[in-house]
Structures are given as C-alpha cells and as structure tokens.
Image (tube, helix red, strand yellow):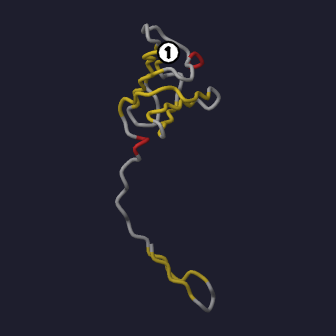
C-alpha cells in the first residue's frame, strides 16, 4: 500500500495497492480432528469452545447438521455437552464442527 497526499489540499492524490500473497490460516482454523475438553458451550450462538492446552482453545460453530455422539456412540443434543467433557471435534474447514464425539466425561 502506498498513498500520496497533496500537502496543499490535505487530500489523497494517489493510492497504489499491490496484491500480497494470502497468509496461511491461523492455527486455530486448521482443518481436521481436534481433541480437548469442553471449555464452554453457547447454545444461542451455536458455538463450542474446546481447550486444547493450558493456554489455548479453539471455537467451533455447531449447527443442526453437527453429529454429536456420547462415549457410548448414541446421539446427544448440543445442550447435553458438559464443561470438562473430553471430546474429539471433526472440522473439515477448521471453523465448523461436522461431528463431536465425547471421549470421556468428568
């Protein structure tokens, strides 16, 4: 980005925009399976936060198409997920949860 201002009018005289390569996706948007524990659920927003380490967490969008299964393999509702549950979240795009599987409960 290069901007040239006219000192007399204090207006923008020219603007030169150059294309830059897109940076890689942040680590919190990496597609694939994420394992961690439920840190928070927001039913109204449709989000699930998964703590993946002491100082890191990932947030996923949960929709009516998200398959949620308990540790016995039976379907669960989003509201049934509890803070502290160990889960595996499959996210093909790194943002939305395609499936959530409870590994163990506290």
Instruction: Say which residue appears at 57% left-offset and 15% top-offset.
Output: 80
User: Is the residue 74 above or below the residue 96 in the image?
Assistant: above
Q: Residue 2's image quarter?
A: bottom left
Element type at mark 1 = loop
Q: Residues within 10 Å of mark 1 (few under 14, many from 20)?
A: some
Q: Nearer the viewer, residue 22 or 89?
A: 89
Instruction: Say which residue appears at 62% left-offset and 32% top-offset.
Output: 45
Is residue 18 toward the left or the right of residue 80 in the image?
Answer: left
Q: How many marks?
A: 1
Q: Can you give x and y, in whole percent of width and height, for residue 102 in the image?
A: 45, 17
Q: Nearer the viewer, residue 32 or 9?
A: 32
Q: Nearer the viewer, residue 29 or 13?
A: 29
Instruction: Say which residue appears at 38% left-offset and 39% top-offset.
Output: 30
The residue where tag 1 is placed is: 105
Q: Can you give x and y, in whole percent of width and height, for residue 1 in the image?
A: 45, 72
User: Is the residue 25 above or below the residue 95 in the image?
Assistant: below
> Extreme bottom residue here?
8
User: Is the residue 24 above or below the residue 8 in the image?
Assistant: above
User: Is the residue 49 above or below the residue 83 in the image?
Assistant: below
């Amino acid at each position: 980005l290069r901007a040239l201002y006219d000192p007399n009018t204090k207006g923008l005289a020219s603007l030169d925009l150059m294309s830059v390569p897109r940076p890689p996706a942040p680590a919190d948007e990496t597609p694939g399976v994420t394992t961690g524990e439920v840190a928070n659920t927001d039913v109204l927003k449709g989000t699930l936060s998964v703590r993946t380490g002491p100082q890191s967490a990932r947030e996923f969008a949960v929709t009516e198409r998200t398959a949620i299964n308990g540790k016995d393999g039976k379907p669960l509702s989003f509201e049934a997920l509890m803070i502290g549950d160990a889960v595996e979240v499959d996210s093909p795009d790194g943002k939305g949860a395609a499936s959530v599987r409870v590994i163990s409960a506290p």
